[in-house]
Image: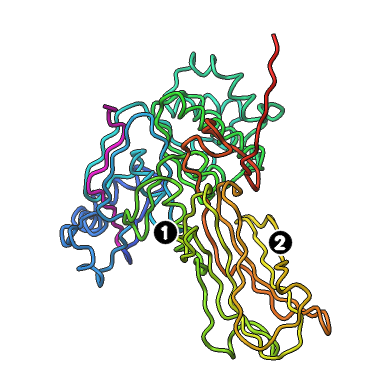
Amino acid sequence: MSSIAIRAENVSKVYRLGVKEETDDSLFKSLGKMIKSPISNYKKYRSLYSFSDLDFDNPDANADSNVLWALRNVSFDVTQGEVVGIIGRNGAGKSTLLKILSKITPPARGRIEIHGHTSSLLEVGTGFHNELTGRENVYLNGTILGMRKKEVDRKFDEIVEFSGVEKFLDTPVKRYSSGMRVRLAFAVAAHLDPEILIIDEVLAVGDAAFQDKCLRKMQDVGSQGRTVFFVSHNMPAVTRLCQRVIMLSNGQLVADGHSHDIVARYMHEGSNTAAERCWDDDDKAPGTDIVRLKRVRILDENRQTSASSLDIRKPVGFEMTFEVYQDGHTLLPNFKVVTDNGVDVFIAVDIDPEWRKKERLKGTYITTVWVPGNFWSEGSYFVDVGMITLKPHQVRQFFEREVVSFQAVDPMEGDTARGDWVKELGGVIRPLLEWETDFTQ
């Protein structure tokens, strides 16, 4: 049985609103205030950090109070060697949770257990001194993260090579870009060989090559049996790196499970699209006096409206219902599929021989195109729908973007095109092809 690396039990973090937390420029000034006004200073402290008036077990009971619940009764266990992603909208509590796990800020209530040496990278350039050079900051940052000088010496060349800032090592970091800072900070944090690595949005800074380099390094850390706790808004990176994902919303843990399932839920909840969309009002339906769009659906292999998450091994159908209001027009329904980062996957036009080049009569039509199983790569996809008249004139009647969406999931059972490969496998599509091998000896 795997041992626990991180345990959170009913962790809550609350901030008092409307009360200013004052800081002093010097210890002498702070001590002077305490001596002059001990009672008022104690009251200020209590007003900021005492929450005895709150009902932690029922946060909704405090809805009218002047507090912000950054986290509400969050509980989970992470075993050694797990790579866990934390996702959620801005303000969900992700960074607050990581700060508590890193012991930067204490919880208002609850308990945290950390078993193992921890390395954290929560902000760009954490631990860097602007007036020191990059070289000096490597040693300073290494010391802050718990490394001895001999350890830094042993890792120094590897850290510098990974960061890619060798030419600027003897330049003060105040002249570094944010990308250069995060390169250096991540290199130190990742090469410390921690038992637990906590990373907050490192992929928000830096070019694509560096982001891929970071992902590969975190994969290496995870493959060595170390624990990785990773916060990101980059969903493809989360599904690539993590088997398990925890989703936060308004400070609460709302989902915890397999990365593909939780990411699909996150994408679905954050999008205005789903697996089905209807237009009941003709005046609001896309189209013209000739033809209007009525409904679009994504179908599973049983011709039912699909779930938001689809097994890539199964066929998927795109169904369009449209109403024709005038006789005598040749119509060309079409679908376009786009990835979540805007890459066109394909455009499909209706080539059904029963209707190809034929004029349509007034009435309701349902057109479906089927994509075979083992076609998709993992990821999120959006479906655009369009309609063109070919005769008597070639005119676009409607074109709607991102009408429906779905998440393609590889179950990782060895019977897809990835075979037994469990790490990153790129590509916009992933067809299952036939292989032949001749062997002679």
Q: Which residue appears farthest toward the top when viewing the image?
A: 441
Picture quadrant where residue 293 is located: bottom right
Left or right for 117, reference 402: left
Q: Which span is picked out in magenta?
A: 1-16
Q: Which residue appears farthest toward the front when viewing the image?
A: 354
User: At x 40% / y 42%, what residue is drawn?
Assistant: 244
Please name the amino acid that badge 2 sits on: Ile
Q: CA distance from mark 1 to mark 2?
A: 38 Å
Label of residue 322 in the image:
none
User: What percent of the width, then of the height, locates residue 195?
Assistant: 39, 26
Q: What residue sits right under mark 1 in the picture? A: 91
Of the 4 image quadrants, the one containing the C terminus is top right
Q: Which residue appears farthest toward the right when viewing the image?
A: 393
Picture quadrant where residue 394 is located: bottom right
Crowdedness near tag 1: few (<14), some (14–19) or many (≥20) residues, C-alpha within 10 Å: some
Between residues 383 and 241, which one lies in front from this camera angle?
Answer: 383
Question: Is residue 313 positioned above or below 401 on the image?
Answer: above
**Closer to the camera: disc 1 or disc 2?**
2
Q: What residue sits right under mark 2 in the picture? A: 347
Left or right for 134, reference 61: right
